[in-house]
Amino acid sequence: MSDYYGFAGTNLYIDLSTGKIKKEPLDQQLLQSYVGGMGIASRMLYDLLSPDTDPFAPENTIIFATGPLIGTFAPAAARVYTLAKSPMSGLLGTTNGGHSVGIMLKYSGYDNLIISGRAERPVYLKVFDDDIELRDACHLWGKDTWQTIDLLRKEHGTCSVSCIGPAGENLVRFANIINDKRSSSNKTGLGAVMGSKNLKAIVSRGTKGVEVADRKRFQKLVDEILAHIAASSLTMVWRQYGTAAKGSKGTGFDREEFRQRVYKRYYACQACPIACKSLISLQGGNYDGLTFNISALNSLAGHHDIARVENWDELAKCVELENRYGVDGAAMAAVVNLMAQLSENGIITAADTGGLTLTWGGETIQKLIPLITYKEGIGALLAEGAKGAAEKIGMGAEKYANHMKGVPREPTPSSIFTTTVLGRATNPRGGHGDRAVSPFDLKGVTPEYLKEYSLGIGVPEGALDRVLRGPGGYNVPRLTKWVEDFNSVLLSMGICIRDPILKEMNLETLTALYETATGITTTPAALQNAGERIWNLQKVFNILHGWTRKDDLPNTWSPDVPIVIGDVSYGTFNQILDEYYDERGWDVKTGIPPAKKLTEVGLGELAGDIS
Ligand code: SF4
């Protein structure tokens, strides 16, 4: 029986070089300061990695981190965070995945799984409660992710499997991790970090459960949140259309066509009442009968907008191949985007690509996936990702590579400018707006709701005037700071950030969930401060590992040309960034947190590291 509530209370350390397996109690100081999950793991990596650690060196450490609410029945508390130094950015790599992996690790008795070193031969890690073992994976090496999961389940019965495909084995910099054939941990290339360690998979099955401190109050809170989520029209939209909820009418991605012709039924990560994921099955067309659980149809944005994939059938085939080979779809789309533009501008020709015509669309993606995975021909270059490939090509190719900090995709100022869009630039992991997603992105939010939400996530009364002033009723850069801090708390607890959840969460609710689950007393202000601490910690990590202000600037368009959408001007990107840094209390010119700020958020001891 654990002495902990909410948390399992134990970290599990695996050294693949020596085969040593060690358990240690969860550090109370870290627990108090960094909420859990992503927050705690960020601090562990900060302490473990030196700035000159190569992402593919044995010293790089990969952590699978569960938050305190994972394994309880808190709604949508199913997201396990994976962190390591990223082979795409050279900075802090983070990704989160769902389905059952976090819960199985937690039920086995572990909050964090910390893996370092490099095995001599391919291995996989078995974590079944106290039965922990490194097992030979030579028979799995070379298998795709779906084959790997099937083989491991045949051997071990019902269990959670997180694994890499051949792309991860071959150190493709944008390789991903596939969980249970139902969820993908994309972005930042952490599948390649597993590959560099000769670690093919983690299988887990736990039976210990998780105790909450005050079952009665916790249950009441959960029931109230569930009732709101069930009554929300947003929930039904996400359940019916999955991440295609924002499908684009008039393109080959009409969401009604998706519903009628492609969609079969919804499914969910464990403990989630939203169920935004879809089993799809194509009827007719080139891929008739193709059936699988598609985790993230928001690859629609990446594939359609970036690579010009034209319809659901093409998209489904691309995602199937990406999942099986184990490559991040958004990064694949960025590679095609780069090569198509370089061809159009005469920077590369068929003579440079081994005779291949690399143009827009799904066919190019499908053609390139095996070449990139096995680093054949032009694939060896493109396995570096859009940024890395463009740098090697030279001749001005860099300005066509769509990325932030090496990770696709850039903030796009063409149709909408919100916290999520700016968040793609400011996110420590680069290229993705997840940490700044807010209901402000939804259409039709009223000024009253804007105020209520802002106060709920910790914007002080005195700051409302500056934060809620601007186009659409708010100042994007100033509000982004507060949303990022709030989402850092939410994600560190293990909760998903889909719209229907975000609409139900504020610091009061999180405080109540945290206290009743863990028995640890906290306050909304303390949690807000912890979110800001996590953000600043990740920033300092990045600075130490080479970040400079230019890494927060867009790559393919000028940061000094005003962003105008419709008849609204948001100023230049440089001005927006200045304002964001100002709201964060960072040096406006460099974007570096001063010692005063670090002390304010409880990180004063790190100031010397970056001075
Ligand atoms: S909303 Fe979707 S991604 Fe999030 S926990 Fe639920 S099913 Fe998983």
Image: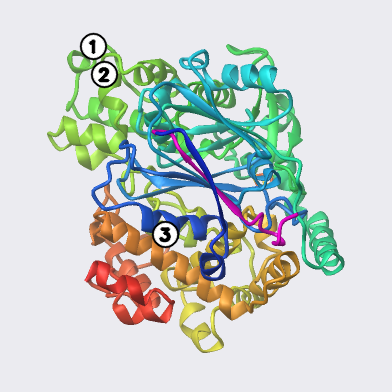
To which residue does mark 1 refer? 354
Per the image, is 283 magenta?
A: no
The quadrant of the image that shows the N terminus is bottom right
**Disc 1, ligand 1: is the CB inside 8 Å?**
no
Q: Is residue 35 left or right of residue 7?
A: left
Rendered view: 90 above or below 421: above
Gap between marks 2 and 1 measured at Cα: 7 Å
x and y percentages locating residue 534 in the rendered image? 46, 65
To which residue does mark 3 refer? 422
Q: Residue at x 63, y 75 (%)?
A: 456
Dot 3: few (<14), some (14–19), or many (≥20) neighbours within 10 Å?
A: many
Dot 2: few (<14), some (14–19), or many (≥20) neighbours within 10 Å?
A: some
Gap between marks 3 and 1 measured at Cα: 38 Å
To which residue does mark 2 refer? 378
Which element is circle 2 on? Answer: helix
Per the image, is 4 magenta?
A: yes
> Residues in magenta?
1-17
Q: Which residue is drawn at 62% across and 16% down?
A: 151
Which element is circle 3 on? Answer: helix
Mark 3 or 2, nearer chain start: 2
Q: In this view, does 103 lie to the left or right of 35?
A: right
Q: Do the residues labelled 2 and 1 touch (CB within 8 Å)?
A: yes
| Most foreground residue, 509 or 20 | 20
x and y percentages locating residue 166 in the rendered image? 44, 20
The quadrant of the image that shows the C terminus is bottom left
Three-letter residue code for mark 1:
Gly
